[in-house]
Image (cartoon, rainbow, N blue to C red):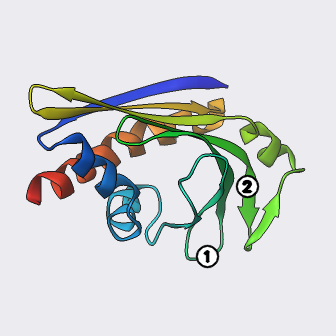
Amino acid sequence: MNRLHFSIIINSQRENVWKAMLDQETYKLWTITFAEGSYYEGSWNKGEKIRFLTPEGEGMTSIIAENIPFDFISIKHLGSIKDSIEDMESPESKSWASAFENYTFRERDGATELRIDVDAPPEFEEYMNSAWPKALARLKEICEER
């Protein structure tokens, strides 16, 4: 598994970027590049379970490893979801187990630098390298329109 890095400068305060990234309604807007209709179930609170889903019932089951408001959030993936059922045993699911997705928010001259660090199995690197920059550009649009 490799760790991929992405970042963007958003002309908005950290609190606004944080809220736009994690709020259910705006989450659906910026994650469309990963899968149309993406949403989550659960909580962003540390130690809480969260499920990232598509309308077809596919996705990831995870736990929030850390949550420092407006500064850092860490997601630990536990397995995948197929047909709305959590799968921790298949080879594909095990390839994601213990992968982390970390979001770091830093103030930069009145703007916010958002850094994403994502662990990804080699077979998903091309997809992540394509989808994340588009998702971050969409998040930037959402934040700067407000």
Q: Nearer the viewer, residue 67 or 5?
A: 67
Disc 2 marks a residue whose amino acid type is Ser
Which residue is the site of mark 2?
80
First of labels 1, 2 by sequence position: 1
Q: Nearer the viewer, residue 111 or 120?
A: 111
Relative image position of residue 141 (x, y in whole percent): 16, 53
Q: Residue at x 60, y 46 (%)?
A: 46
Under circle 1, the secondary element is loop
Q: Is 113 on the left-hand or right-hand side of 31?
A: left
Kindly indicate whether the residue at mark 2 contacts the one at mark 1 (C-beta within 8 angstroms): no
Q: Residue at x 47, y 62 (%)?
A: 35
Disc 1 marks a residue whose amino acid type is Glu
Which dot, 1 or 2, sits closer to the camera? 2
Q: Is 70 on the left-hand or right-hand side of 103?
A: left
Relative image position of residue 11 (x, y in whole percent): 11, 40
Q: CA distance from mark 1 to mark 2?
A: 13 Å
Quarter the N terminus occupies: top right
Q: Residue at x 43, y 68 (%)?
A: 36
**Mark number displayed over residue 137:** none
Relative image position of residue 17 (x, y in whole percent): 26, 48
Q: Is 57 on the left-hand or right-hand side of 73?
A: right
Which residue is the site of mark 1?
56
Query: Outermost residue toward the bottom?
Result: 55
